Amino acid sequence: MIPFDNTFATLPPQFFDRQDPVPVPAPEMVLFNDALAQTLGLDPADFPPEVLAGNRVPEGATPLAAAYAGHQFGGFSPQLGDGRALLLGEVVTPRGRFDIQLKGSGPTVFSRNGDGRATLSAALREYLISEAMAALRVPTTRALAVVKTGAEVPRDTLEPGAVLTRIAASHIRVGSFQFHYARRDTQAVNRLIDYTIARHYPSAADSPNPALSLLQQVLESQAALVAKWMQLGFIHGVMNTDNMAISGETIDYGPCAFVDTFHPDTVFSSIDRQGRYAWGRQAGIAHWNLAQFGTTLLGRIDPDPAQARKLAQETLDRFPDRFAQHYNAGFARKLGLSRPAPDLVNDLLSDMANNGVDFTLFFHRLTGFAAGGDSPRALYDTPGAFDTWAESWRAAGPDADIMRAENPVIIPRNHQVDRALKAATAGDMAPFRRLHAALATPYQDSPDKAPYQAPPTADEIIHATFCGT
Ligand code: AMP
Ligand code: MG
């Protein structure tokens, strides 16, 4: 029996809509994450395909679609909500309390024009990338399983449908607060503040101003998270406020991707035509999203609106410094340095952008170079630019051991992911399994990594990734 201990479902009715998943014709297991089940102390026998597909609601589950709002590409939608997902419930594990959510489990009251379903390709993509992120030591939601539904879902073509089982510290988003705030439901906002503090930031409860402390702690986790993304060349792709988790985990893997040839303006999302969520803009967007979050907390920060705004603003104004601290410390470690070296990092990144340098391969080769191997200079259009920079870097005293722990040998490259997903959609899971296995130990240089190290050739480059609903 799954040891459910559901708390979100005890919140007032305006937080969610209770409903069961919509059954599918033929549940079939595609992937089950035994390692994750084990870490969480969950029994795989409790998760047969019928349960993972939503055809059987397990004992103790209280399935619900959560309500949330969100700024999407800057425009506010007062009602989004789980349009194709249901929270089954929560489990308390040795690693803490986690949500178990089915994604692609059928239409809900929040589906608007959507069909409530997910394609096998999108479910596998989230599984692969979120598990790779976890192995890269980035805070993230996890993937417990993918099952096929036996039904096809209409997208550009008919595609096999699937349900992903997602594990998350919670599914509370900036948009969850915005939902109640936009309705001027002060009681609900306050209830959500207390719930979130108790669940994620319990120390805020002891602070003289708990809501302000909550804002400050969420700001800190986002600053750390986005810095970590950028150090890996990760681009989330849809940093709408409904896709920012209060827990500080990466959530909602849609058109996300890792940069190959480095440029700060890189965008992959086919729907992000303005480059709003480009690699180099992610910190600014996180700051903007946090300001939206702060707005919802004002009434609890201080009864005097002017004072509340002043306190929230002071906290928000710390974001650039907090982010810079994480970013500079992380990039210093990528360079093997124990002290921040922002000038060295800025010079390097601008040289890389000007020289068409592959991000992951460069840092991997630089690690080898620090350990006495070959120079990565050949990755530059103008190798002399690297030599000049490398003199200053050498002078700073890089340590190859620090670099090895920070620079992955591989990341999930778009063209490799795409190839694996196409094969999986056509019924061949072997390429997916190989890629997934290699990504389980991204910092370990072993022979299974070799096929995934090379950047895409000109005709392999993927320019856009789709929202993959
Ligand atoms: P996303 O941008 O994928 O995070 O989703 C934004 C909103 O669209 C959320 O409310 C989702 O639940 C909803 N949504 C996305 N895909 C579907 C779908 N296939 N059916 C119903 N709702 C969806
Ligand atoms: Mg979303």
Image (cartoon, rainbow, N blue to C red):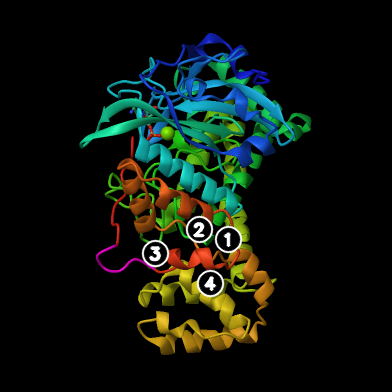
> Sequence-wise, which precedes: disc 3 or disc 2?
2
Dot label at residue 260: 3
Q: Please say if the residues under marks 2 and 1 sit with CB atoms less than 8 Å apart.
A: yes
Tell me, yes or no, if residue 239 can be seen here.
no
Residue 31 placed where, x, y %?
A: 49, 37
Frontmost of labels 3 and 2 is 3
Structural distance between the alpha carbons of marks 4 and 1: 19 Å
Query: Which image quadrant is residue 216 in?
Result: top right
Residue at 50%, 58% (x, y): give it.
230
Q: Secondary structure at mark 4?
A: helix
Dot label at residue 364: 4
Q: Secondary structure at mark 2?
A: helix
Magenta stretch: includes residue 397: no
The image quadrant where one finds the N terminus is top right
Dot label at residue 327: 1
**Bounds of the magenta segment:** 455-460
Whether label 1 lies within 8 Å of ligand 2 gets the answer no
The amino acid beneath tag 3 is: Asp
> Sequence-wise, which precedes: disc 1 or disc 3?
3
The amino acid beneath tag 4 is: His
Q: Taking 200 as reference, is 183 left or right? A: left
Frontmost of labels 2 and 1 is 2
**Nearer to me, 91 or 112:** 91
The amino acid beneath tag 1 is: Tyr
The residue that mark 2 highlights is 230
Structural distance between the alpha carbons of marks 3 and 4: 13 Å
Structural distance between the alpha carbons of marks 1 and 3: 20 Å
Tell me, yes or no, if residue 428 can be seen here.
yes
Q: Taking 280 as reference, is 219 left or right? A: right
Q: As drawn, which residue projects farthest toward the left?
A: 157
